[in-house]
Amino acid sequence: MKDKRILYVSSEVVPYLPETEISSMSFETPRMVNQLGGQIRIFMPRYGNINERRHQLHEVIRLSGINLVINDLDMPLIIKVASIPKERIQVYFIDNDEYFKRKATLTDEDGNLFPDNDERAIFFAKGVIETVKKLNWAPDIIHVHGWLASLLPLYLKEYYKDEPLFNESKIVTSVYNQSFDGTLNEDMFNKIKFDNINEDAIKILEKPTYNNIMKVAINYSDALIIGSEDLPEDLTKHLKDSNKPVLDYKHKDEFSEAYAEFYNTKVLS
């Protein structure tokens, strides 16, 4: 992995949010690559319940200040950055007052999904790509974790398909069992269609369930990792039918060698 550039895009990362399967692997995997001499960048949303003072987040003025169009509305992009203590790993935070100021991640205090989670996912995907463009940092691999990050493969290969910085980038998506009940905003399909994205590619998002959102991510990824011991049967079948390289589930204590080999022999080969 020496000198390989790997971009990690995740809906959650420890130590900024509580430990889950996703937040833990979104830290352990880049740490492993970092120790093997790879170059890494991590991106996650700057939810309002992340303590900026304790984690020493600060805004990067030269990266902030552009507007992203979401469903015909201009939404300002704010970029913050912090370093994970002792690891020499930088984390970039995608922020916007409208989408990420509330003191919660994906649900309200009653456990209901926020009605604008669909727009937050679109904003996050576009925000990551626009920021990496500003950094002029061409990743060899882009590794996606969590459903809020899962529109990135679609946007990269449709909306940003003519962006030369990502010509050689390979997309890996980890598929987890950390899902949600019901659907996101039923208008999600139209909001993505507004960006002139191939209608046939997102037809399935007319019903934006967890499984359907992940199926779109699978369709637009180059390789896949099973991130949970048990996945919904529907997703397991879709992974199998994708005819793409798939790495079976590896426990946190034994993943390092398998992930590094998968990157080298299946993703980059």
Image (cartoon, rainbow, N blue to C red):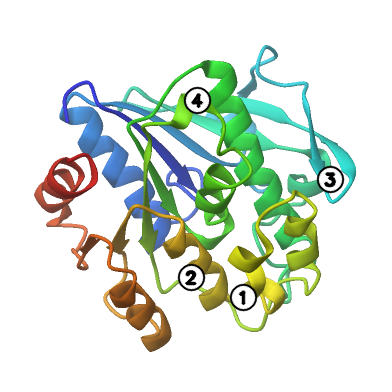
* Whole-number angstrom distance, CA of label 2 to CA of label 1: 9 Å
| Label 3 vs 4, first from the N-terminus | 3
Residues at circles 2 and 3 in contact by the CB criterion of under 8 Å: no
Q: Residue 187: which quarter of the image?
A: bottom right
* Whole-number angstrom distance, CA of label 2 to CA of label 3: 28 Å
Give the number of the mark in front: 3 or 4: 4
x then y, percent, for residue 29: 28, 44
* Residue carrying label 2: 215
Give the number of the mark in front: 2 or 3: 2
Circle 3 Cα neighbour tier, 10 Å, few/some/many (<14 / 14–19 / ≥20):
few
Circle 2 Cα neighbour tier, 10 Å, few/some/many (<14 / 14–19 / ≥20):
many
Element marked by disc 4: helix
Q: Residue 180: which quarter of the image?
A: bottom right
Q: Residue 98: which numbered mark, if any?
A: 3
Residue type, label 4: Pro
* Whole-number angstrom distance, CA of label 3 to CA of label 4: 31 Å
Residues at circles 2 and 1 in contact by the CB criterion of under 8 Å: yes
| Label 4 vs 2, first from the N-terminus | 4
Q: Going by the picture, which residue comes out furthest to the bottom?
A: 233
- Residue 111 appearing in the image: no
Residue type, label 3: Glu
Judging depth in this view, the residue of 92 and 48 nearest the camera is 92
Task: Say which quadrant the C terminus sits in.
Answer: top left
x then y, percent, for residue 132: 53, 26
